[in-house]
Image (spheres, rainbow, N blue to C red):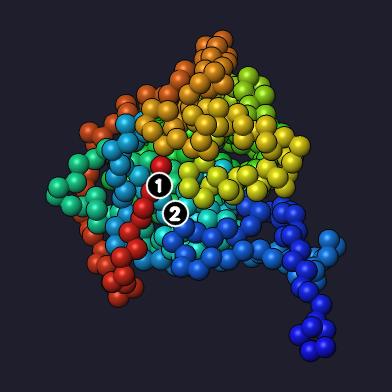
Amino acid sequence: MSHDENQQPQVMLPPSSLKGQKGRGAVSNLQGRFEGQLREPYDDGWEHEDDAVAPVKTEVTDEYCKSILSRNESPDLPFSVSLNPYRGCEHGCIYCYARPTHSYLGLSPGIDFESKILAKVNAPEMLRRELARASYVPQPIALGVNTDAYQPCERERKLTRRVLEVLQECQHPVGLITKSALIERDIDILADMAGKQQAAVAITLTTLDPAIARTLEPRAAAPARRLRTIRTLTAAGIPVAVSIAPIIPFVTEPEIEHLLEAVREAGALSAHYTVLRLPLEVAPLFQQWLEAHFPERAQRVMNRVRDMRGGKDYDSNFGSRMRGEGVWADMIRQRFKIASARLGLGGHSSRFHEMDTSRFTRPLVVPPLGARARPADTGQLDLF
C-alpha cells in the first residue's frame, strides 16, 4: 500500500458558529466588495469553544483631505451639504449604512470599520479655505451624518470642536446628529450659535433597552445617557430633535411609543424615524449579528424586513428607502404618526431649513495648505 493510500482523509469541518465580541458590533471582518481575493472561514479543529479571543484595538490614522464638504441631491434628505471629520466609526452600530464606504479603502465594512478610523486632521483648515472662496454660497452644513462626529477619538482629536469654532467665527449655520454625550462639551459654542438660529441638534435613539444597545451600538452612549443629553442641551437653549432610527422589526419596533414618550419628557421638540436599511455589505453583517444575538427570531426579523422591501433585503429607491412599503411599513408609519401627534412631537423639524445664513462672514485669513498636505486624493464619499 502506498504512502498516499495510508493517509487518512481530511475532514472538512463546518465553520464554528459566529459569536459577538464585547465592545464590537460586527461579528466578522466580512470582505469588502472590491477585494481581489475571496476568503472563506474554515474550521481546522484546533479552536475550541473556550479559547479566548484577543480584543481588537482601535487604530486612528491621520488623513489629509483635499476637500471637506460633500454635496448631494438626494430628494429624501433634509440637507445638501455635509461634513464628516472621520471615516469609520468606533460606535460600531451594526446597522450603519456607512459601513460599505470602508470597502473603498480596501478595508472590511465589518470590524475594520469600527476599529480602523481615519481622522481628517486638516478638516478645520480645509473648511476655512472652502468658506473663503468667492463662489461659496452659505447653506446649513450637516455635521457628522455619515459617521459620528463625536465618536470616542474626538475626545483627544477635537476635530469636530475646531470645525465648530470655524463655523461660529463665520456665523455659518450647522446641524449635528449624534449618539454621543460628548456633544455636551461644545455647549458653549452651540448655545451661542443656537441663540442666533445658527445651530440645531438631533440625537439618535434606537432603543431604551441597555442590553440590546450594548450589542446593537456597543460603544455609543447608553440610552439613559442620551436622554440626559437631550435634557442638558434643551436646558442650554439648543433645539433638539430626535431620530428614532433605525426601527428594526421585533427588536426595537415594539418600543416605538415608549421611545417617543421618553424623548418628549426629556425635552425634544420633534421626532422622525427610518426603518432598517441594509445596503451592500450591511445586509450580511446584520444577518450575522442576528444569528449571534437573536438566533431564535433571526428569520422572523428578516422576513419582515423583506416584506417592507418588496421581497429583497434592501430597496434603494428614493421615497421608499427610508420608510419601506407594504402592510408592515404602513403599520409603523401609523403608530409613529399617532404617538407623535398625541405627544406634540412634529415630524421632520423645519429648523434646519430655517437657520439664518444672512450673517455669514467669509474668513479673513486663509492658512496655506502647508507642507503637511499630501497630493493623494482622499476626498470624502458619503453613501446614502
> Which residue is farthest bottom?
2
Q: Is residue 344 above or below residue 178?
A: above
Q: Amino acid at mark 2?
A: Thr
In the picture, which quadrant includes the N terminus? Answer: bottom right
Image coordinates of residue 253 in percent, x first then y, are 63, 26
| Mark 1–mark 2 CB contact (< 8 Å) | yes
Q: Is residue 17 above or below residue 329?
A: below
Q: Name the residue tied to disc 1.
A: 383
> Which residue is nearer to you in this view: 377 or 199?
377
CA gap, disc 1 and disc 2 = 7 Å
> Which residue is nearer to you in this view: 45 or 63?
45
**Can residue 329 be seen?**
yes
In the picture, which quadrant includes the C terminus? Answer: top left
Which mark is first along the chain, 2 or 1? Answer: 2
> Which residue is farthest front?
1
Q: Residue at x 67, y 32 (%)?
A: 300
Q: Name the residue tied to disc 2.
A: 101
Give residue 159's quadrant in the image. Answer: bottom left
> Which residue is nearer to you in this view: 164 or 123?
123
Q: Residue at x 62, y 35 (%)?
A: 302
Image coordinates of residue 113 in percent, x first then y, are 54, 57
Mark 1 residue element:
loop
Image coordinates of residue 222 in percent, x first then y, are 67, 41
Q: Is residue 25 above or below residue 320?
A: below
> Which residue is nearer to you in this view: 238 or 314?
314
Q: Residue at x 76, y 73 (%)?
A: 10
Mark 2 residue element:
helix
